[in-house]
Amino acid sequence: MATQNLLQAIHDGLAEEMRSDETVMVLGEDVGKAGGVFRVTDGLQAEFGETRVMDTPLAESLIVGAAIGLSVNGMKPVAEIQFADFIPPAFDQIVSEAARFYYRSNGAWEVPMTIRAPYGVVPGGALYHSQSVEAYFCNTPGLRVLAPSFPADAKGMLKSAIRDPNPVLFLEHKMTYRLIKQDVQEDDFDVPIDKAKVHREGTDITVVAYGLILHHALEAAEKMEGEHGISVEVVEPMSLYPLDKETVLASAKKTGKVLVASEANISGSVSGEIAAVVADGAFEWLDAPVRRLGAPDSPAAPYAKPLMERFVVGKEDVEAAMLDLARY
Amino acid sequence: MAMERTRVRHEELGLDGPDLIRLYRGMLLTRRTDERSWTLNRQGKAAFVVSCQGQEAAQIGAATHLRPGYDYIYPYYRDLGITLVVGMTPRDQFLSILGKAEDPSGGGRQMPGHFSKRDLNIVTSSAPIGVQYPQAAGTALAFKMRDEDGVVLTGGGEASTSGGDWHEAMNMAGIHDLPVIFLIQNNAYAISVPAEKQVAGSIAKRAEGYGFPGVEVDGNDVLAVYEAAKEAFERARRGEGPTLIEAKTYRMRAHSSDDDDRRYRESAEIEEWRLKDPIPRFENYLEEHGIMDAAQRESIDEEIKAEVREASDYAEAADYADPESISRGVYAGGN
């Protein structure tokens, strides 16, 4: 066991998979000598060479398209999109191509490809280095969208993603890269690719959250317990698509009150889908409306600090929403 | 001078009589399969047909160099001829256009022309134009990483060179000397838009900017395409990198069974190109050189027509997939 942050855990997961399987490779912008703009691929090119850790031209459609082509010819590529904000040019390759190869060929062509993308608000990131893009991709059968929020889960889940025969979009909240630390196993382990996780048991309300907001929620849950005697269950979806509906519903039925929180714009969000799942599958157990907490429906986090702070969901917002729901 | 050179063209390419007959058979099989597809559409049996008529020389001349099941193919929706050369069959085509369960391209899930066959390395294709190019570059990169001499053949019409995917893939192929061949069949139209409103300058010459050879050939001359592709395949196998081939040809039918081309092109133009139809043109060559006479031509055609009829009958009698299967196979590894 070693204490690692999210970034180190993802780095190690990648490096271990590359050591144990020579078909695993990395491609993207600045992933080579620079080790990626966040240093996730630091040292990998020195260890595995310029081809297995390939700096590509600055062209996202090419990065993902080439990864598809590699994946159907014996490789297990891990493509990096430098910022999730830059993923739209690759949308066609991800949604219309990779996600459909298997279905449209009636099971003939698998695409064992992983796309890593840092998302989420960081100070100064502004409109184009802050976006939460997950909702665009969570309407796409054939694609997996993962967003683990703890270092150990991220490491294990990345391994599962690389080994999975399907295309996986692996989202990493960049604000948590260095913020969140945890003891992480050094030996080989994987984490189920399609299961949600109950981080904290509780009886009064359920909070379903991911990314930085999950960490806010866990902190707030302690405070609720201590200061208000409210028992909060905290569930992390882990796989945003497909959703592990059973785990979410089991918790909703247990507490009867559900808050779904994320950093994304509320309308059309993954939170909305989770709320619908709860409303549809646990209606008779509910004692309050399913609540969603998220960013206002303005494009993304602005640059100036006061504007950014108005945009993001803060710890106090999570606490207030929990209290409000508990008292309903 | 020109006449003398013409007379020995196939010998210069190392092709003998049986080789030429194989090329001819491939072209005619493609044409007859395509014609039968239209008949099935006009009979109301096939919902959609997209045609390759007029482009048989470009397709067969290039695809003949492929090693089926080893080299990879990223076709576009008119590449029926390419798929037939490497081992797909008229039966596969009719199963596809009729949407039957046995359709190897997708079991009735995909529109006709969206070819796929795993054991022939024909990679599943789709409808957005040009998406196959970055994929083809990636597949070629995998060959190069393993130090294998596999080649990737990909292509599309002239309009497929307008989008970013084509340029991104050309750039990538040039940077890494990837074993990929871009076969652009410039058939003069993108649905209704003529090539002069689609293409600035020359497609073939663009390759120079990406650092590899680009050649323009008469796409209705099967031997010219064969020759250009031969060089391209040899170059790729030697590890010297990509080649762009622009085959100038003409789309003889409407864009698809849902298109009325009388709205945007003159019948005189179609008639003019009919005189340059690659199939009669090659027949003339074969007759002139004593490779095939009229009787042989008849007998080949009869054989092909019988094969096509039988394949069509088979496909008509075949079953559709179980409607309940629509949710199966969304994810690999069981779902």
Image (cartoon, grey):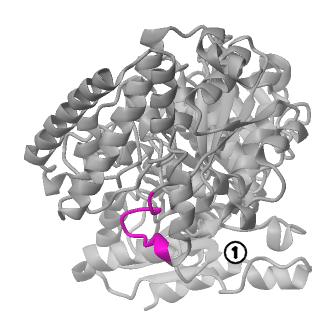
Q: Quadrant of the C terminus of chain B?
A: top left
Q: Amino acid at mark 1?
A: Lys
Q: In the image, which residues are magenta? A: B253-262
Whether residue A145 is visible:
no
Q: Residue at x 51, y 59 (%)?
A: B271
Residue B255 is covered by the magenta coloring: yes
Residue B235: percent from the left, percent from the top? Answer: 74, 17
Direction left: furthest residue? B317
A195 lies left or right of A270: left
Q: Main secondary structure of the magenta part?
A: loop
Q: Residue at x 15, y 57 (%)?
A: B323
Residue A327: percent from the left, percent from the top? Answer: 46, 89
Q: Which residue is identified by label 1? A: A315
Residue A300: percent from the left, percent from the top? Answer: 75, 77
B40 lies left or right of A328: left
Between A216 and A270, the residue placed more toward the observer is A270
Q: Residue at x 70, y 59 (%)?
A: A89
Q: Within 10 Å of the Cα at label 1, are there few (<14), some (14-19), or many (20+) other Cα atoms?
A: some
Chain ID for label 1?
A
Residue B305 is covered by the magenta coloring: no
Residue B79: percent from the left, percent from the top? Answer: 47, 41
Q: Secondary structure at mark 1?
A: helix
